[in-house]
């Protein structure tokens, strides 16, 4: 497969512990040779410095959405991506990154100055609260098998439509 | 004269999102601010009211990369608060959990983050399969990572957010077939780890600024869980002094407001550990290092790029130590040790891959968490990182192009192996 037809991958982390990024780099131990052939890792900061932010066949979104700025970023990524996948518990259900959503009034009072200072949203959001999501991989972290299944299904679909 | 602001909004090939700004006025570096771009997730607030049994898994979610270190450290804090003494087997399984973490986490940092800088590549995956040396390193990198991942999964259930370690012991025990497989994998990656050590021994990058360093140093053999805290000034804080050390040395320092100009910085991590405990490395590790040209004579060092070499050395130690522990122990099912809940304070101190990690927990008589503190390595390294960057940039002025300065800064920060997910809660922010 030549360079032009490689599947363009974006990997973006929002509010989370980035456990899915680590799982992805561990799954890579067994799949890197195949991935090197079929994927153009276009914007994956954990893997490279010269990231290109133009368009993506698959954008993976890890983490919950904690600010207006993040909300705008994820909308922008959506507008550039054929498929958008929410990975991990924080992206899919908003937790634990959004645990402040259920804090008591007293707890909220003690953290309010930080919410204000960082211009954070009053409530932390799931990815699907902000944009249309094509697939979700739940788990804290996501399971490698579920990740591979979603990746392989999307690759088959994109290769069919691209060919 | 030069006056400009330099700002790196997203430092790449590190754990998490960090940015850095440098202010230069009249050719002099005036200010450096290294900060996290992560939003706060309030783990130490959310831990209040949780049951002790749930606390380690909760605090693991501070950071995916370092999750298993947070779990072991939190368990230690909880057991100290409850007065539980771990069994010998539990201690060995915890040691193996940390060895698995060290192997896979250092390997990620060294191969995927740092090595591309040495070979003039943007990414590890850009290494050329048709070049014999690069081909070898590509395969080495993923095999070493996989061996660490296998060990971590066998012993602790998962290499990220482990499921087997618990307050009072382990919930699952490795079987013979898994142990044999782990030994085989570890033995087979040993030559790759020796090649890795050579790469970082010969790496052309150096930056040496005299600074203090600190690590938890065991009494007998090199490890990451037990011992006393030792400093480059020769001070020692035994286990009975951990609370005092945390509350009087580490915490006030981390909360100082004008630290950029006043306080003295110190460094934690693999370099600090090898500096303070190189004599305790596994005999096989020491033998190999000698045959590679007396590498241990390079330590103690404050050349931050030797942090990479120290990490490579630790991978070898963890491989050799794990092979020993797996070969010479029979693992049997043991019930969790229980204790009647009581009011208490517990301190956990371990060496996470990036340096000394402190957990403090205060529990009430009903076994619920009242409050706690978590102090992470990257928070402790912040001042050192900023001071190093200030001198690095000053030395590059006035003739170096901005792009080159940015690249040199990123390379230096990468050598510290910072973890921004951890730092999100604890790194000082300049509100400016």
Image (tube, coloured by chain):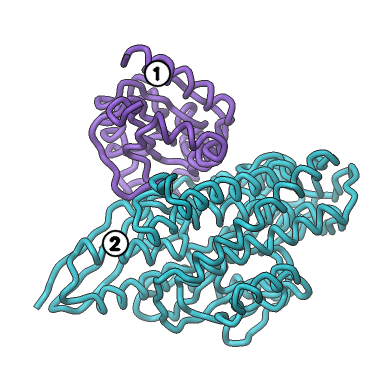
| Horizontal and vertical percent position of residue B176 | 85, 41
Extreme-bottom residue of the structure: B234
Q: Which residue is located at x 75 percent, y 61 percent?
A: B321
Q: Which residue is located at x 54 percent, y 70 percent?
A: B268
Distance CA(mark 2)–CA(mark 1)? 37 Å
Say left or right for B67 vs A78: right
Q: Which residue is located at x 64 percent, y 49 percent?
A: B68
Residue B38 seen from this side: no
Q: Which tint is chain B?
A: cyan
Say left or right for A144 vs B256: right
| Horizontal and vertical percent position of residue B20 | 30, 61
| Horizontal and vertical percent position of residue B28 | 19, 79
| Horizontal and vertical percent position of residue B26 | 13, 78
**Residue where numbered disc 2 is placed:** B407
Tell me, yes or no, whether dots 2 and 1 are on the same chain.
no
Query: For the residue labelled by badge 2, is the local secondary structure a helix, a strand or a loop?
Result: helix
The quadrant of the picture occupied by the N terminus of chain B is bottom left
Task: From this view, report whether residue B403 is shown above or below residue B13.
Answer: below
Determine the chain carrying the residue at label 1.
A
Q: Which residue is located at x 40 percent, y 29 percent?
A: A38
The local crowd at label 1, few if under 14, some if 14 to 19, many if 20 or more residues have their Cα within 10 Å, is few
**Residue where numbered disc 1 is placed:** A134
Q: Which tint is chain A?
A: purple
How many badges with numbers are in the image? 2
Task: From this view, report whether residue A134 is shown above or below residue A112.
Answer: above
Residue B98 seen from this side: yes
């Amino acid at each position: 497969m030549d360079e032009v037809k490689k599947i363009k991958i974006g990997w973006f982390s929002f509010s989370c512990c980035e456990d899915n990024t680590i799982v992805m780099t561990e799954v890579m131990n067994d799949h890197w040779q195949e991935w090197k052939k079929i994927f153009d890792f276009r914007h994956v900061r954990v893997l490279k410095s010269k990231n290109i932010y133009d368009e993506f066949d698959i954008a993976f979104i890890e983490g919950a959405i904690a600010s207006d700025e993040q909300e705008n970023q994820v909308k922008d990524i959506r507008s550039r991506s054929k498929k958008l996948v929410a990975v991990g518990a924080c992206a899919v259900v908003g937790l634990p990154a959004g645990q402040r959503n259920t804090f008591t009034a007293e707890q909220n009072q003690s953290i309010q100055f930080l919410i204000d200072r960082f211009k954070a949203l009053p409530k932390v959001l799931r990815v699907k609260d902000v944009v249309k999501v094509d697939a979700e991989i739940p788990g804290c972290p996501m399971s490698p098998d579920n990740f591979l299944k979603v990746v392989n299904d999307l690759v088959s679909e994109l290769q069919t439509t691209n060919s | 004269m030069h006056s400009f602001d330099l700002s790196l909004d997203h430092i790449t090939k590190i754990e998490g999102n960090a940015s850095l700004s440098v202010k230069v006025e009249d050719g002099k570096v005036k200010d450096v601010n290294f900060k996290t771009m992560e939003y706060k997730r309030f783990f130490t607030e959310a831990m209040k009211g949780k049951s002790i049994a749930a606390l380690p898994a909760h605090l693991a979610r501070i950071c995916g990369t370092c999750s298993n270190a947070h779990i072991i450290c939190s368990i230690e804090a909880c057991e100290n608060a409850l007065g539980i003494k771990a069994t010998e087997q539990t201690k060995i399984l915890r040691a193996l959990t940390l060895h698995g973490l060290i192997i896979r986490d250092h390997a990620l940092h060294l191969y995927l983050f740092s090595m591309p800088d040495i070979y003039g590549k943007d990414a590890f995956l850009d290494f050329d399969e048709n070049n014999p040396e690069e081909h070898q390193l590509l395969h080495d990198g993923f095999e070493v990572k996989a061996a660490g991942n296998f060990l971590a999964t066998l012993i602790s259930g998962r290499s990220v957010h482990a499921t087997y370690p618990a307050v009072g012991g382990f919930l699952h025990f490795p079987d013979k077939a898994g142990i044999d497989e782990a030994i085989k994998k570890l033995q087979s990656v040993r030559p790759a780890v020796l090649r890795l050590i050579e790469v970082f021994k010969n790496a052309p990058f150096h930056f040496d600024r005299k600074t203090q360093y600190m690590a938890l140093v065991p009494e007998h053999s090199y490890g990451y869980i037990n011992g006393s805290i030792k400093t480059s000034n020769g001070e020692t804080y035994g286990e009975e002094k951990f609370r005092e050390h945390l509350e009087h040395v580490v915490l006030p320092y981390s909360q100082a407001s004008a630290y950029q100009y006043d306080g003295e910085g110190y460094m934690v991590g693999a370099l600090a550990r090898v500096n303070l405990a190189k004599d305790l490395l596994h005999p096989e590790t020491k033998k190999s290092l000698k045959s590679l040209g007396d590498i241990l004579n390079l330590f103690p060092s404050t050349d931050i790029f030797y942090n990479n070499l120290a990490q490579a050395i630790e991978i070898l130690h963890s491989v050799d130590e794990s092979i020993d522990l797996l070969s010479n122990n029979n693992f049997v099912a043991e019930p969790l040790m229980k204790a009647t809940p009581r009011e208490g304070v517990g301190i956990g101190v371990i060496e996470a891959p990036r340096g000394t990690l402190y957990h403090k927990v205060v529990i009430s008589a009903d076994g619920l968490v009242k409050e706690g503190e978590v102090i992470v390595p990257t928070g402790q390294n912040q001042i050192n990182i900023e001071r190093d960057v200030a001198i690095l940039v000053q030395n590059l002025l006035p003739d170096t192009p901005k792009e080159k300065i940015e690249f040199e800064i990123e390379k230096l920060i990468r050598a510290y192996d910072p973890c921004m997910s951890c730092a999100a809660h604890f790194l000082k922010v300049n509100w400016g």
